[in-house]
């Protein structure tokens, strides 16, 4: 997991009591949500719209006395469903979501190292293409820092099923790309 | 294949109950194969994460596309060329003929001021006429200059990326070049500010 992944101990209770808590949550979760949506295949603009809408929905949800348990999973679920609703772009790009876009590597280290890292990421990308959709989504949400229980809530799966899916996906990746 | 291997990912993700996690941990310490796979899964997770970042990086909001500095440089270059062209094509302002009839008759010539000076030297007895002519010439000169454009100020925004190598300046910094153009089209003053 990266250093900027979502902290595991988020304030799950009493968020509605203080609007600034929602603002803090926004600063904390905006980037992981954007990353998840962009990896799903949304453009940067679409992803920002979805994140914005998700937080507006959260505000309404909390203002109307909605459930305050597991706000992080709730936000990812809303964002995931909104991404699904943008079916056209979602369908169009889903097959190519994890391909290309490594220009940022050129900013670091030597050209040889850049080449090696690009090659490694290309192998991972090729292996990810071969995963089932649920496996890919589980890995993306896991990379976003969500627990198996939260992933299950987002995708509508049992926690044990998430565990099996993640394990199967990781084994497939390990077999298909030697990184 | 070791049976514990199926639990390694969940163990690395800290998703196993404490007791089960402890068992896996002890097993991994003894089993070389599981240790190898655990290291492989950990590395794979990091690579997957890096790939997600790689996908996000070029699409992140606020990043300046590579063509922006090129376009900005082109705009600046085009503006400067336009200024040079304008400067070379500026024609001298037309001198207006005095409209007031003079007592000595018409004074031909493009500039009454030029004509009046020798006339005053030749005929001192016509001092009154000269004074009248001089004041008329001044009015004509003033009228002529009123038709000319005053000093013009032009501001050109230049992104820092267009002037400095990538990374030398923080993103989003722009400079403004203030150009003061004289009525004859020449650049009188250039000032660069942030």
Image (cartoon, grey):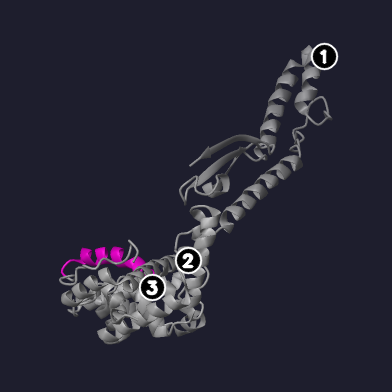
What numbered label is drawn on residue A16? none
Q: Describe the element under mark 2 as helix, strand or loop.
A: helix
- Quarter placement of the N terminus of chain B: bottom left
**Residue B16 percent across, percent down from the top left:** 22, 77
Same chain for marks 3 and 2? no
Residue, x 57% and y 53% (percent of image)? B69
Is residue A74 in sight in this rendering? Answer: no
Binning the other alpha carbons within 10 Å of mark 1 as few (below 14), some (14 to 19) or many (20 upward) gives few
Most frequent secondary structure within the magenta stretch: helix
Magenta highlight range: A17-35
CA gap, disc 3 and disc 2: 12 Å
Camera-side residue: B124 or A42? A42
Q: Describe the element under mark 1 as helix, strand or loop.
A: helix
**Residue B146 percent across, percent down from the top left:** 65, 38
Q: Describe the element under mark 3 as helix, strand or loop.
A: helix
CA gap, disc 1 and disc 2: 83 Å
Residue A18 counted in the magenta span: yes
């Amino acid at each position: 997991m990266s250093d900027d992944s979502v902290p595991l101990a988020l304030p799950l209770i009493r968020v509605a009591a203080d609007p600034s808590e929602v603002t803090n949550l926004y600063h904390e979760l905006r980037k992981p949500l954007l990353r998840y949506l962009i990896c799903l295949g949304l453009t940067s603009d679409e992803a920002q719209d979805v994140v914005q809408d998700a937080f507006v929905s959260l505000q309404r949800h909390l203002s109307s006395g909605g459930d305050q348990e597991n706000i992080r999973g709730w936000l990812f679920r809303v964002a995931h469903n909104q991404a699904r609703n943008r079916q056209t772009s979602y369908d169009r790009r889903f097959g190519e979501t994890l391909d290309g876009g490594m220009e940022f590597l050129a900013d670091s280290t030597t050209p040889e190292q850049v080449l090696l890292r690009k090659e490694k990421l290309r192998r991972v990308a090729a292996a990810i293409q071969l995963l089932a959709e649920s496996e890919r989504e589980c890995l993306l949400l896991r990379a976003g820092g969500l627990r198996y229980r939260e992933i299950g809530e987002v995708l509508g799966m049992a926690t044990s099923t998430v565990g099996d899916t993640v394990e199967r996906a990781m084994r497939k990746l390990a077999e298909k790309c030697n990184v | 294949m070791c049976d514990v291997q199926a639990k390694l990912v969940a163990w690395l993700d800290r998703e196993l109950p404490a007791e089960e996690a402890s068992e896996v941990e002890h097993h991994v310490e003894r089993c070389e194969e599981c240790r190898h796979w655990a290291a492989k899964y950990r590395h794979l997770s990091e690579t997957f994460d890096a790939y997600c970042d790689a996908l996000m990086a070029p699409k992140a909001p606020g990043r300046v596309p590579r063509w922006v500095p090129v376009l900005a440089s082109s705009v600046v270059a085009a503006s400067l060329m336009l200024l040079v062209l304008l400067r070379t094509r500026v024609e001298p302002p037309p001198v207006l003929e005095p409209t007031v009839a003079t007592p000595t008759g018409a004074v031909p010539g493009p500039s009454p001021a030029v004509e009046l000076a020798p006339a005053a030297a030749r005929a001192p007895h016509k001092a009154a006429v000269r004074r009248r002519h001089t004041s008329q010439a001044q009015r004509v000169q003033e009228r002529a200059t009123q038709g000319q454009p005053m000093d013009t100020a032009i501001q050109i925004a230049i992104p820092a990326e267009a002037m400095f190598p990538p990374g030398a300046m923080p993103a989003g910094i722009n400079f403004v070049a203030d150009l003061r153009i004289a009525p004859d089209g020449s650049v009188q003053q250039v000032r660069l500010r942030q």
